[in-house]
């Protein structure tokens, strides 16, 4: 079974250089619509796309699901290789909005190009989504914050050494040089702040820095990232946001701080601990996302 999964993963990587061409995006969207139609579910036209990060897949349980589609059934979609990422697209309703939620995302460290890893964002936009809600688990680098806190992303720093927009630009998908002066929509952020205040949820706000991984950082690297102006660090999100902005989508970003990355008191991190903290904070994340959708 592992050999079969590895072959499928390699097959998914091959040929990804054309992932950001309009015809491939349309083909994937059409395949999803066909799958939903065969399940006798309502037509696919989501208002909002949601990307669920490490340990956050259970947010999908809050969705009133009409249909689900395995990533392996969508042409051009990568396959999840991280154990906490289910690899399924959920279509349904949350907070009164039609949503398409990805239970599992893709990372550069899995061997995917950033173009391929962000292909699903293109497809969700083609299905009709004009807003992207992206979530992640991250390491906190501020001593006045705590593991389990939720952070509203105000801005980001891309240290992946790459961009999903490198290469030929298909003008049908977006402009050659998209503006990034406000990648995280201020109106959505204001709504998130209001919802958090109403629900008495502690909501931090700060800068997310994306690094390649999969290794965690050294003490010296955490000091460097903090000096650069980052508040939390992770291995995802930024490529998806770049593609969403390129496509003209509004973006809301939320991070769950799952471990503390303080150089002078650094403790070894484990995936089990990270997942446990993410699960504990998930009710707050779910309530925030639902509240924002209800007010859109």
Image (cartoon, rainbow, N blue to C red):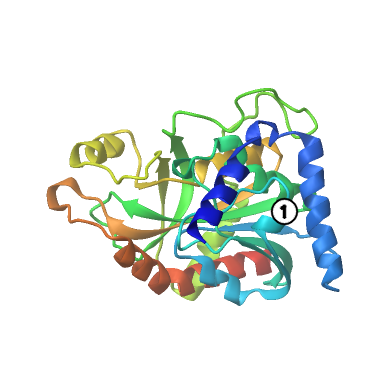
- Who is closer to the viewer here, 173 or 255? 173
Is residue 170 shown above or below 245?
above
Figure quadrant of residue 134: bottom right
Work out whether residue 294 or residue 265 is closer to the camera in this orientation and state it.
265
Identify the image quadrant of residue 18: top right
Task: Decide if residue 111 is on the left or right side of residue 13.
Answer: left
Q: Position of residue 154 (x, y in %)?
A: 48, 46
Taking 215 as reference, is 9 left or right? right
Q: Which residue is drawn at 82% across and 72% down?
A: 39
**Residue 275 vs residue 80, the one in the foreground:** 80
Q: Is residue 271 above or below residue 40?
A: above
Residue 114: x, y in percent? 55, 37
Look at the image and tell me in which quarter the C terminus lies: bottom right
> Residue extending furthest left?
264
263 lies above or below 294: above
Q: Is mark 1 on a helix, strand or loop?
A: loop
* Residue 141 visible in image: yes
| Residue toward you, 173 or 287 | 173
Total marks drawn? Answer: 1
Within 10 Å of disc 1 (Cα), the crowding (few <14, some 14-19, many 20+) is: many
At a point 44% along the width and 42% down the height, the residue shown is 109
Task: Using the rendered image of the protein, determine whether residue 182 is visible from the camera's viewpoint.
Answer: no
| Identity of the residue drawn at 61% across and 40% down | 116
Q: Which residue is drawn at 14% across and 53% down?
A: 265
Q: Residue 251 location in percent, x, y?
A: 61, 49
Q: Residue 270 at what x, y percent from top left?
A: 27, 60
- Answer with the quarter of the image where residue 249 lies: top right
| Residue behind mark 1 | 74
């Amino acid at each position: 079974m592992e050999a079969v999964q590895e072959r499928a993963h390699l097959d998914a990587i091959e040929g990804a250089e054309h992932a950001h061409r309009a015809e491939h995006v349309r083909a994937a969207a059409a395949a999803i619509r066909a799958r939903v139609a065969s399940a006798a579910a309502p037509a696919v036209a989501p208002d909002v796309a949601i990307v669920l990060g490490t340990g956050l897949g259970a947010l999908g349980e809050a969705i009133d699901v009409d249909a689900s589609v395995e990533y392996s059934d969508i042409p051009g979609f990568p396959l999840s290789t991280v154990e906490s990422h289910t690899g399924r697209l959920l279509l349904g309703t949350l907070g009164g909005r039609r949503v398409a939620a990805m239970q599992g995302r893709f990372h550069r460290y899995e061997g995917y190009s950033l173009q391929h890893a962000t292909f699903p964002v293109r497809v969700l936009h083609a299905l009709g989504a004009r807003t992207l809600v992206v979530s992640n688990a991250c390491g906190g680098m501020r001593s006045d914050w705590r593991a389990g806190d939720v952070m509203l992303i105000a801005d980001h720093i891309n240290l992946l050494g790459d961009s999903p927009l490198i290469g030929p630009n298909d003008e049908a998908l977006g402009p050659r040089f998209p503006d990034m002066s406000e990648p995280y929509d201020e109106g959505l952020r204001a709504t998130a702040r209001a919802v958090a205040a109403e629900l008495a949820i502690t909501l931090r706000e700060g800068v997310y820095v994306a690094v390649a991984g999969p290794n965690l950082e050294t003490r010296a690297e955490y000091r460097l990232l903090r000096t650069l102006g980052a508040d939390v660090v992770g291995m995802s999100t930024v490529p998806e946001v770049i593609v969403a902005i390129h496509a003209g989508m509004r973006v809301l970003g939320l991070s769950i701080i799952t471990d503390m990355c303080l150089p002078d008191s650094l403790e070894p991190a484990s995936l089990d601990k990270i997942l446990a903290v993410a699960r504990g904070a998930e009710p707050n994340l779910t309530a925030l996302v639902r509240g924002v959708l209800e007010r859109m």
